[in-house]
Image (cartoon, rainbow, N blue to C red):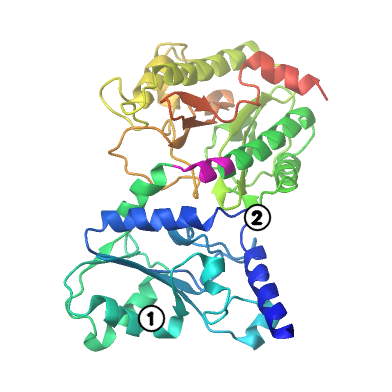
Amino acid sequence: MMRKLFLVLLALAALAASATERQDNADYKARRVGLAKLMNGGTLLLFAPTESDGPNNLYGFRQEDNFYYLTGWAEPGAAVLISSNPYSEVFFLADHNLIQEKWTGPKLGPNDPQAVQVTGFDRVASLDKIHDELLRVLGQSRAPVYSDLGENAQSSPSSGPLDWLRRGNSFPSAAFRDAKPLLAKLRMVKDAGELRLITRAVEASEAAHLSALKSIRPGITEREISALMQYEFGKRGCERPAYAPIVGSGFYSTVLHYSLDSGTLENGDVVLMDVAGEYSMYASDITRTAPVNGKFTARQREIYNIVLGAQQEAMKAFQAGRSRLGRGPDNDSLDKIARDYINSHGKDLHGQPLGQYFIHGLGHHVGLNVHDANDPSLPLDKGMVFTIEPGIYIPEEKIGVRIEDMYYVGPNGKLVLLSHHLPRTADEVEQAMKSK
């Protein structure tokens, strides 16, 4: 009886150690089946990072995005094997190491009775058996083996294990291919569970921005604003920032990836806050710009209104299945629409168009990563989540303005503003700063 109770507690501990919220096992199974259909008879072999491989120096271990997308498993040291013809799946877990678990907490082992129920896989096996399973599945097949092969000469969590498996000439006919392009196509379209988690991340980040707007004043430091925002989205369930927070005032509002957050807010400047949280592995990405003293100058308001106008023009032009985020020569490019608007409204101090000060892309997909996996050849369509974030950055005037919101394409093809609780117009920003 005590043994059974221990195993139940072990299974619950494995779930508790995962992200704050986890989707149903059926959702992850549907993704695995969907990937199998894209592999045309191939096999997927994917490894999770080990404890030492993961970015665990600050916020603890974080699972690799593609592995989590297919498995919902947040623990290190696992692997997944999916065959597409016929379909079969095996999830591999490390055998119990009781000494290590005294340091890292209880883990789910491959032989635990609850392993199949907890993971949602048809079969769970020991990592030590992965070579034998591959021999069984692949045999003399010439079907491709998909995995994370890394890119730009970089290694991946699968690189080392794949090198080990290739030794000894066990799989002489196996042709290895990169699984990331197939997974990117799947990850572009969010299911209902993903949208719910992204919405939670957005709502927590909205609260952080509203709190910051009420706290901004001359003399407060950028670091105080950053810390306040991280506290606000953290107490609403976000495990970590979705990216390095950026709070830049004055000249540093014009520096895109300013990360020191060490300055003091000065009267008469603007402050740009690109800060958002990650909730249960899903990112959000929001930017707001505000006057430090609560009132835009005429010039700051002019620049702000041009940026807002560019965002609104892109929103208005959006058409599901046709519009694209990237730059392009025709009006299907939302980037071009926004740039044309900026270039046709306002000038710099030398009489030149302002488009030269819009120095980044208009937006990007968001999901398990803040710059989420995607196929850039595909237009924006139903189920996709992305940002629209025009900006103008004029170092000579110490004015940097970006307005970044998150959007979702609904089942009817209409564009839905996810970050709709935040002020967007200059008047709304000033009003939010007054209501302290």
Which quadrant: the C terminus?
A: top right
| Residue sitting nearer the eye, 367 or 228 | 367
Badge 2: few (under 14), some or many (20 or more) residues near its Cα, within 10 Å? some
| Residue sitting nearer the eye, 135 or 361 | 135
The magenta-colored residue range is: 190-196
* Position of residue 318 measured from the top left corner of the image (x, y, whole percent): 39, 22
What is the total number of numbered labels drawn onto the structure image?
2
User: Which comes before the other along the chain, label 1 or label 2?
Assistant: 2
Residue visible at 59% across and 33% down?
Answer: 287
Decide if residue 30 is on the left or right side of residue 430: left
Q: Secondary structure beneath disc 1? A: helix
Residue visible at 20% across and 70% down?
Answer: 175
Main secondary structure found in the magenta portion: helix
Can residue 193 be found in the magenta stretch? yes
Residue visible at 72% across and 26% down?
Answer: 292
Decide if residue 418 is on the left or right side of residue 134: right
| Residue sitting nearer the eye, 89 or 230 | 89
Give the residue pinned by disc 2. 20
Which quadrant: the N terminus?
A: bottom right
The span from disc 1 to disc 2 (Cα, nearest Å) is: 30 Å
Q: Is residue 296 visible?
A: no
Depicted 233 relative to depicted 399: above or below:
below
Q: Is residue 433 visible?
A: yes
Q: Quadrant of residue 129?
A: bottom left
* Position of residue 46 measured from the top left corner of the image (x, y, whole percent): 38, 68
* Position of residue 123 measured from the top left corner of the image (x, y, whole percent): 44, 73
Depicted 354 relative to depicted 187: above or below:
above
Q: Secondary structure beneath disc 2? A: loop
Please name the amino acid that badge 1 sits on: Ile
Please name the amino acid that badge 2 sits on: Thr
Give the residue pinned by disc 1. 130
Badge 1: few (under 14), some or many (20 or more) residues near its Cα, within 10 Å? many
